[in-house]
Image (cartoon, rainbow, N blue to C red):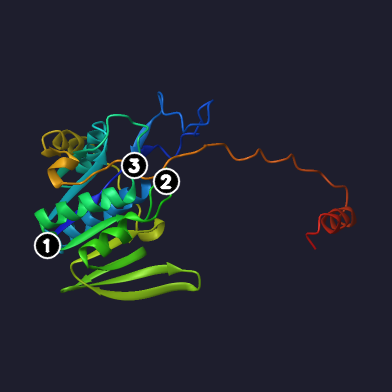
Amino acid sequence: MKVLVPVKRVIDYNVKVRVKADGSGVDLANVKMSMNPFDEIAVEQAIRLKEAGAASEVVLVSVGVKQAQETIRNGLAMGADRGILVVAADDVHQDIEPLAVAKILKAIVEEEQPGLVIMGKQAIDNDMNATGQMLAALLGWGQGTFASGLEIEGDKAKVTREVDGGLQTIEVKLPAVITADLRLNEPRYASLPNIMKAKKKPIEEKTPADYGVDVTPRLQVVKTQEPPARKAGVIVGSVDELITKLKDAGAI
């Protein structure tokens, strides 16, 4: 079974995000970029399936700027087999919207014929949490979202999902789309030999036009602003004073 894993290039989660002075978006100048953490978890899960004999090949796909090739290389160094880069933008500030990404992925799925698509539940830059669901709808496949556990049993996948009430286990028939949550696994670090091997693994370069998809933005960012700074705390001298302040604030 072939496993397809979409990955996105985002600001590294350790970097403090800065908003542009004019409020038009996030400043990406000289900022460290890396693979979306949820996508990294998806890559790790796909590799584990291959190591367990449940998958024969792991193919990575990224839709965005040409620099996303580095993101794919990182996944190849982890153990994926090959990559597909769809260059859909020249400006790093242009974000390809979920529907356009889902349409491109649908065309790639029809071309590659994977038995499973595993992807992050959302990207940490825009928090859309929509691409996986849209892809499943376009393909007419079953889906298991927010997966914290995944087992392949024959032609079915057993997915443990995190829901408000706790954990829910569902069974979906393959092929299916699975979106990975934080607790699905802990991604490995790429070893130096694998990093060197990744440089020789193939990455096929495509464009949205190759798949007949229009990536013109449908959404317009009106304004971007940082959240308000938290007010300084107050040190109280006693429990009675604390209770009084909480009452005055309406907290109790």
Amino acid at circle 1: Met
**Circle 2 residues within 10 Å: few <14, some 14–19, many ≥20:** some
Answer with mark 3 or mark 2, whichever residue precedes in sequence: 2
Q: Nearer the viewer, residue 121 or 79?
A: 121
What label sits on residue 1 in the rendered view?
Answer: 1
Q: Which residue is mark 3?
A: 217
Residue at the top extreme?
Answer: 30
Instruction: Locate residue 162: give its quadrant.
Output: bottom left
Badge count: 3
The answer to whether residue 79 shows anywhere in this view is no
User: CA–CA distance between discs 3 and 2?
Assistant: 19 Å
The local secondary structure at tag 2 comes to loop
User: CA–CA distance between discs 1 and 2?
Assistant: 29 Å
Question: In the picture shown, does residue 99 fall above or below 204?
Answer: below
Answer with mark 3 or mark 1, whichever residue precedes in sequence: 1
Q: Which residue is mark 2?
A: 124
The answer to whether residue 210 shows anywhere in this view is yes
